[in-house]
Amino acid sequence: MKEMMKLGLVLLLFSAISAASLALTNQATLPSIEEARKEADLENMQQVFAEADDFEAFSDEDLAKLKEQAPILNQLFTALKGGEKVGYVAKVIPNGFGGPLEIIVGFDGEGSITGLRVGKHSETPGLGDNATAPEFYNQFQGLTLSKEIGVNKVQAGDNEVQALSAATITSEAVTTGVNELGKLLGGLE
């Protein structure tokens, strides 16, 4: 009985030390992880709106009002060039086949898409994660948010994109995220 108690206490002590070490490691690396995430977001913003040289975040209050119109909106920035507004960059998070799917979209004041990138996701490797390939996301460039963008399984038509093979749910999730931004066009000026 004493041996079992001793073994239990040793195991408890080992577990407590391990948990404390993990907590300290997490706390120590959190700023680096957040900084790397901000850098990745900035790089994605510059890829979806190459003309811009700076990005100004919307206030929390303004963002909350816009989320009433487009609930999957996560972040919104004004794209600036030489201090002048040239458009917007938004991050929306619709649900794909594997769960939440981060989409970063650049668009000008008229609603023309300047670029799109798919960020963090849990889509199926080799199928839904092909949304991160230029062959898919480049289809959105030049399309307009002023009318709904569709998904076509065979061949893209006017204001449509061609669905990823065997990943229609992911294709539709990306398109839904983009279409939600169309609801905001009138309220962004």
Image: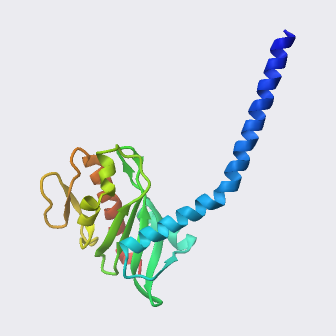
Residue 162 rendering spot, x and y as whole percentages: 19, 57
- Residue found 55% across the figure and 74% down from its top: 59
Q: Quadrant of residue 22?
A: top right
Instruction: Please state, as top left, top right, bottom left or bottom right, where the N terminus lies in the image.
Output: top right
Residue 158 in percent (x, y) is at 14, 67
Q: In the image, is residue 159 above or below residue 108?
A: above
Name the foreground residue: 2 vs 156. 2
Q: Please give the name of the residue rendered at 52% of the width and 73% of the height, measured from the top-left corner.
A: 62
Q: Residue furthest right?
A: 2
Outermost residue, top side: 1
Q: Quadrant of the C terminus?
A: bottom left
Q: Position of residue 12 (x, y in %)?
A: 78, 27
Name the colour scheme: rainbow
Q: Is residue 97 above or below residue 157?
A: above
Is residue 86 left or right of 42 when viewed as pictured? Answer: left
Q: Position of residue 33 (x, y in %)?
A: 59, 58
Q: How many marks?
A: 0
Q: Residue at x 38, y 43 (%)?
A: 98
